[in-house]
Amino acid sequence: MNSLGRHILVEFYDGSAEILNDVLLIENSMLEAAQESGATIISSEFHRFPPSGVSGFLVLQESHFAIHTWPEYGYAALDLFTCGTSVNPWIAYEILKSAFHADHGSALELNRGQLHLLETVEADLKQTEEIATYPNTNPQEKRTIWFTERNDNIAFSIRHRGGWIFREKSPYQTVEVLDTFEYGKMLVIDNRVMCSEADERAYHEMIVHVPLLTHAARKVLVIGGGDGGCVREIFRHPQVEQVTLVEIDEVVVKAAKKHLSTLSLALNHSKLQLIIGDGIEFVGKTNDDTYDLIIVDVSEPVGCSTALLTKDFYQQIHRILSVGGVMVTQSESPRLSQSKFSERYGDLNQIFGASQVHCYLAFISTYPTGIWSFAYCAKTGPHPLHDFDPQQAQQFAQDHQLAYYNPSVHQAAFCLPTFVKNMITMRL
């Protein structure tokens, strides 16, 4: 070899769009390609840019591998640069071409640092303090992989350890569990954060205890919530006699039972009726005035959740709710989804009556913008503040060592910022 390094510029065409948009598959393929070609991996950093495209690189002891993909074109561009003679980058080329299901590829190899053009420079490149501090240090591999949830204007990224703890495609959606550095295990559905071990209690405590500490419901229906977090919190209330959980996707339940035990521990409770089925069909077949409390625990209105967050569905919920009963639903971020938020409360006000609908907020750091809302809707039922006993709530929070909910939070959650109030009242 008459040069310091080999530099291969690679283009892959007509690859799998799905694979080229999957940051974990790409990172794993790049790691495999580097290892099989004889390279020593020092660190990796990969990032997905929703809705499409992945960028990433491996720092190698022998230089680097880098990639960017355009899934919508089935195209990937790579930069494979290796120093010395110990690494064969063409092995990496073949592995990656196969991994990305590319129909064909092209590559241009350049010799970098041609020796006949170089002269050795005499210089002491090792500092005494560096030699003393890092004797015989070998490079350590470090992986930096980011999960990003975003819309056209806002993005939120969480670093995780790479690879999937769980990943399965159901007929409805893709369900994943990732292991994050800051939030522990995190449930992701169709590239949207559902919950994480570190902050899920804020969501589940607020969607459950706010209604149950103002209304002693005995018969409860949960639509969605296959991770089990709502059910866990509901069974902290001894007066509850029966809970029916209707989850359309059994893969969500499977993932939670296998990898999110702190959420799913009540999914085998003797008072729980777990139904894998369509919530709309179940509600449509249910008799009037059946449930004291209904919790709609579904994701944003995309995919199989879309029909569960409509006026028609809420009218059916109102029908099967007992007189004096309460329905609570998550109502998204008032900052991220302003038009949907305003429309939601307009629908609920028409169905339940404006005096019976109350918005309240919680702060959930893994949800985009951090501010999240819930709608408390009574069927000529209790008021979330007037019928609230702070002393009872304080004792309850202490007895169960709640992480987020307490009576002060309960009351303060209904103190809305002006911009939120305006979005609600504009639909009246």
Image: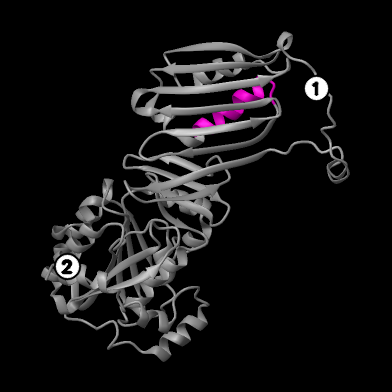
The crowding category of the residue bearing disc 2, from other C-alpha atoms within 10 Å (few below 14, some 14 to 19, many at least 20), is many
Quarter of the view holding residue 383: bottom left
State the colouring used for the structure image.
Answer: one colour
At x 41%, y 13%, the residue is: 103
Q: Earlier in the sequence, mark 1 or mark 2?
A: 1
Q: Position of residue 81 (x, y in %)?
A: 62, 21
User: What kind of residue is marked 2?
Assistant: Leu
Over which residues does the magenta segment extend? 25-39
At x 25%, y 55%, the residue is: 279
- Return the residue at label 1: 121
Cα–Cα gap, marks 1 and 2: 76 Å
User: What kind of residue is marked 1?
Assistant: Val
Q: Position of residue 422 (x, y in %)?
A: 20, 71
Q: Position of residue 409 (x, y in %)?
A: 41, 79
State whether residue 365 is above or below residue 132: below
Which residue is more in the foreground, 248 or 333?
333
Q: Position of residue 234 (x, y in %)?
A: 39, 71
- Quarter occupied by the C terminus: bottom left
Which residue is more in the foreground, 43 or 239?
43
Q: Which mark is residue 348?
A: 2
The crowding category of the residue bearing disc 1, from other C-alpha atoms within 10 Å (few below 14, some 14 to 19, many at least 20), is few
